[in-house]
Amino acid sequence: MQFDRINAYRVMWVFVFFDLPTETKPERKAHAQFRKELMKDGFTMMQFSVYVRHCASAESAEAHIRRVKAFMPKKGHVSILRITDKQYGDILNIWGAKTEPLESPPAQLEFF
């Protein structure tokens, strides 16, 4: 029980919110490339411009944030939010008329 509580504050979720221009062909290409790089790095789409990734630790979250910064397009707005698993558990998703539970985090490998 105590171990689960500690993990709730150690396990992290990284959110990437973006608003990128898509008026010209190069802008649309940069937008598509950014989305592909996010998915290649393990992010999943939560909404059209919101991607989320589960990270086993704060260090892992920092590594993924550095990667996102490395492939960010030159134009547009990108915001990155890092929260604990405990905070993620408090999210309330309302889609249409019914409330949906959160997606469960992926299983972790434990060596000890």
Image: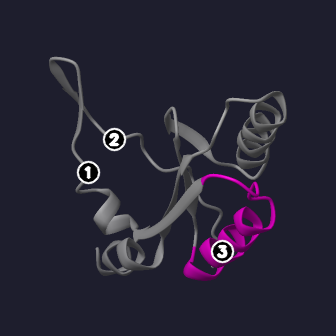
Percent across and percent down for residue 24 are 76, 30
* C-beta proximity under 8 Å, tags 1 and 3: no
Is residue 17 covered in magenta? no
Question: At numbered mark 2, what does the secondary structure look like: helix, strand or loop?
Answer: loop
Q: Residues within 10 Å of mark 2 (few under 14, many from 20)?
A: few
Residue name at image x 37 percent, y 81 percent: 6
Percent across and percent down for residue 70 are 80, 67
Query: What's under tag 2, amino acid-wise?
Result: Leu
**Which residue matches tag 3?**
60
State whether the magenta stretch is mostly helix, strand or loop. helix
Q: Is residue 110 above or below residue 107?
A: below
Position of the C terminus, as image quadrant, is: bottom right
74 or 32: nearer the eye?
Answer: 74
Q: CA distance from mark 3 to mark 2?
A: 22 Å
Residue name at image x 69 percent, y 67 percent: 64
**Which residue matches tag 2?**
102
Percent across and percent down for residue 32 are 76, 34
Q: Is residue 68 above or below residue 2?
A: above
Percent across and percent down for residue 54 are 55, 57
Identify the disc placed on residue 5: none
Point out the stretch of residues depicted in magenta: 57-76
* C-beta proximity under 8 Å, tags 3 and 2: no
Residue name at image x 64 percent, y 78 percent: 62
Question: At numbered mark 1, what does the secondary structure look like: helix, strand or loop?
Answer: loop
Question: At numbered mark 3, what does the secondary structure look like: helix, strand or loop?
Answer: helix
**Which residue matches tag 1?**
91
